[in-house]
Image (cartoon, grey):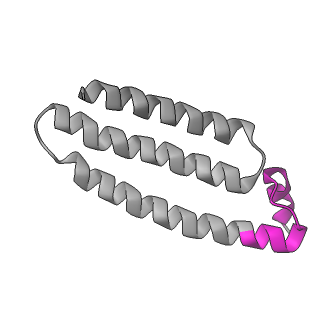
Amino acid sequence: MNPVNYLYLAALLFTIGAAGVLIRRNAIVVFMCVELMLNACNLVFVAFPRMHGNLDGQVIAFFTMVVAAAEVVVGLAILVSLFRSRHSASVDDASLMKL
């Protein structure tokens, strides 16, 4: 398979994730779309250096996965706090957490 096809797939996944972040109002769906965008970046980090013959992108992809895991932990903690106080997982209710 041609490595350029992986770049097209990554662009498609990133576009779907960006559209989901901009359009959706549910915080869980927004977090899933951010994860989709990070996975698209990982695909580029692995496929692009492979086209040039080195494998340095895999190290960067590993660090991106670590950042994504930390983002999930912090994001879900904020989401649980929002849901406990407002009984809703809507992104629009997040501004109401200021006291």
Q: Residue at x 16, y 46 (%)?
A: 55
Q: How many marks?
A: 0
Residue 66, x across and y down, in percent: 39, 63
In the picture, measured across the screen, residue 69 lies left or right of residue 63, that is: right
Image height of 53 relative to 8, above or below: below
Q: Quadrant of residue 80?
A: bottom right
Q: Nearer the viewer, residue 28 or 86?
A: 28
Q: In the displayed structure, would residue 97 be above or below residue 27?
A: below
The residue sitting at the front extreme is 1
Residue name at image x 33 percent, y 26 percent? 5
Tell me, yes or no, whether the highlighted magenta stretch contains residue 22: no
In this rendering, position of residue 56 left or right of residue 77: left
Q: Which residues are magenta?
A: 80-98
Q: On the rendered structure, is 4 left or right of 36?
A: left
What x and y, as percent, mark residue 99? 86, 69
Looking at the rendering, in which quadrant would you find the N terminus? top left
Q: Quadrant of residue 47?
A: top left
Q: Point out residue 40 in the picture as x, y percentages from the top left corner.
A: 43, 41
In the rendered image, the residue lying farthest to the left is: 53
Q: Nearer the viewer, residue 22 or 28?
A: 28
Q: Is residue 81 magenta?
A: yes
Q: Can you say whether 91 is above or below 37 in the image?
A: below
Residue at 60% across / 46% down in the picture? Answer: 33
Q: Main secondary structure of the magenta part?
A: helix
* Residue sitting nearer the eye, 83 or 2: 2
